[in-house]
Image: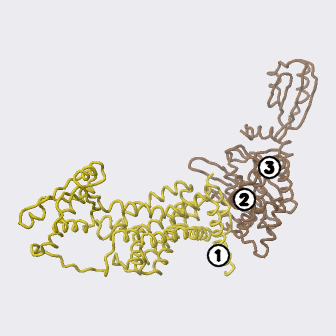
Amino acid sequence: MSQAKMPAVEMVHLVKRFGSFTAVDDLSLTVEPGEIFGLLGPNGSGKTTTVNMLSGLTSPTSGEVRVMGYDLRTHTRQVRQVLGAVHQETALYEELSAWVNLDFHADLFGVPRSEKKARIEQMLALVQLSDRKDSRVSTFSGGMKRRLALARALLHEPQLIYLDEPTLGVDVQSRRALWDYILGLRRQGKTVFITTNYLEEAQALCSRIAIIDHGRLVALDTPEDLKQNFGGNVVEIETALPFEALVELQALAGVQQVEQDGLALKVATRAGDRVVPQIINLVAQCCEIRNIMVREPNLDEVFLRLTGTALRD
Amino acid sequence: MMREIAYQLRVIWATARKDVRSALTDRLFTLLGLFVPANVLILMSLFVLAGSNAPTTMVMNDTGPYAQAFYQAMSQAHSFRLETATAEEAERRLAAGQAVAVVTIPPDFDSSLQQGRPVQVGVEINNLNTDFTNDIRRAIPLSITSFYAKVFPNLVSVTVNETDLYAHDTDYIPYLAVSILVIALMMGGMMQAGTTSAREWEQNTIKELLLSPASRTAIMLGKMLGAFLVGLGSTVIVLAVLILLVGVAPEYWLEVIGFTFLALLIFNTLGTLLGTLVRQRMPVIALTMGISLPLFFLSGAFGPISFSTPLLQAVAKIFPVYYQIVVLQHAFHGFSLNTLGLAGNTLVLAGFALALITLMALVLRRSTIGH
């Protein structure tokens, strides 16, 4: 198989234990070349451990990781050469200037000397930091640091870019700009592996999403299919008087969850169940309906159903 | 192959250059690295100076030639810092803690000696500190003996026939100053390299290094080179204090330079190892102090280790500080403090350096991030 057709990332029965605690439990997934892949999970679900194993910062207890066809255990160096990483804490030398940070990275990753200066200038221009190239990183805002970390990760022209919480703590404007850069990477044919706590971000960027909880894979699909397959419809009804037959409503086959807030009623249904007409009939029998909205669940609601917890718990 | 070597050399130089730049921007730690070793040198020298001579007041109730000769004998005993005073002033000084002892020469000192009568020299001691008290108790009888040997040579039938091993005597302070140089190099080297390494972990920049395709040995060598270059600053300061202020002139300049570099190599490696294991700067500084001071006292700082007990000798020989003191004492004073010879001691030190570098490379190779 040529390298171009190989999966960008292959994790096979990956397990990581710390003593008696299993952080990652038999995780298998594949990331295709050229896609933006999102790894989601509540805090402590094993996301960071998974990506640390992917980048070789932590060794798996068992299982295999292959990046661009290279086995991480036997071809660590090749994996590091094709991987560009942007960590949550950016890992920049804050006491040094933006230029010196990139210059050091270029030397560390063996960027040809003849190309080094041009590439650094190109990357600084890409993330719009050319005018701050000689400023100390410690004087940068959170968004600027993220952009610089992204520029650094791209400097050695990696095929796979791993971004850990790329917009955490970044203002809305910078977040949009970072999203544009990330989407631009896909257009360049790069593979992007993202961990994020923002479902909006995952939905905006990722072609596929894996949700893990307690170290296990809970779901893996496109954002749209996740919503269709793992969430039925959500029925939002506004009544003239408070609805009182909540027990009967909950007892309907296909109803997953009922929430009431004054005159507002929110009913989540299970996927595949055609229970919406029955819900409307039951409510209409008890009180006058003023407004009805039937919609798909959002990714937050899918996540809540799959993991039993909100993403930011 | 050549391309690979060139790449790894590039990584070593880039890492060293980055560390030097970082160190220069972190003023607090740079100052610590530069001045702590010099400060240790000055502190230890003050300690030695303060403890070497006991302030002693002489009450000269007789100023005849024998009394003067006795005063001379005491002043040449290398144990007293003598002052003369009246009996009242001497009592006041003793009571105020300004004198350890008051030695009173009686009014009939000369006449009694001329007539062959026994003389009692009064000694009052402030016995607050046993060390000083015993110094006085030992030194006064020695002064009496040397007084007799000089004034009444016919009465002293036992004399010393001294043959010296070395062409010249070396005072306590020049000897000790070289030992202090070693410990200052140890502190400076370990502190600089240790904090530079720990800083990578503290600020999570270690991920940038561990995720690079460069060999970890190259990264480690780069970090050591960086610490070495920064450490040169403190070394120059310490050597300047030693040579210009303390007045210890090296006998073999090339040895001084060579063994100083070797010391920095060993202590930088030790510091890098410590920083990688501890991963926090403040504990690295505390541990460096904690390790250095006992090793200083253990490793023959005040005199050849062979004068010490067998157990202490055996323990001292486990650590490079002992061998470093041996070779630098040779470089400065031409001493041979053990039977290994200069080449033997150098080989042992090179062995320490090699073992520590290998250990460091293994530790860094196995380094991973938690989670």
Disc 1 chain ID: B
Residue at point 71%, 38% (across, down): A313
Q: Please, what is the three-letter code of the amino acid marked with disc 2?
A: Arg
Give residue B314's position: percent from left, percent from top: 33, 67
Q: Residue under circle 2?
A: A136
Give residue B327's position: percent from left, percent from top: 41, 76
Q: Residue under circle 3?
A: A209
Q: Height in image: B193 above or below B344? A: above
Please identify the quarter of the rendering in which residue A198 is found: top right
Q: Please, what is the three-letter code of the amino acid marked with disc 1?
A: Leu
Q: The brown chain is which one?
A: A
Q: Please, what is the three-letter code of the amino acid marked with disc 3?
A: Ile
Q: Image check: A256 left or right of A288?
A: left
Q: Nearer the viewer, mark 2 or mark 1?
A: 2
Q: How far apart are marks 2 and 1 (CA)?
A: 27 Å
Disc 2 chain ID: A
Residue A1 seen: no
For disc 2, the neighbor class at 10 Å (few under 14, some 14 to 19, many from 20) is some
- Camera-nearest residue between A120 and A133: A133
Disc 3 chain ID: A
Q: Residue under circle 1?
A: B9
- Camera-nearest residue between B102 and B243: B102
For disc 1, the neighbor class at 10 Å (few under 14, some 14 to 19, many from 20) is some
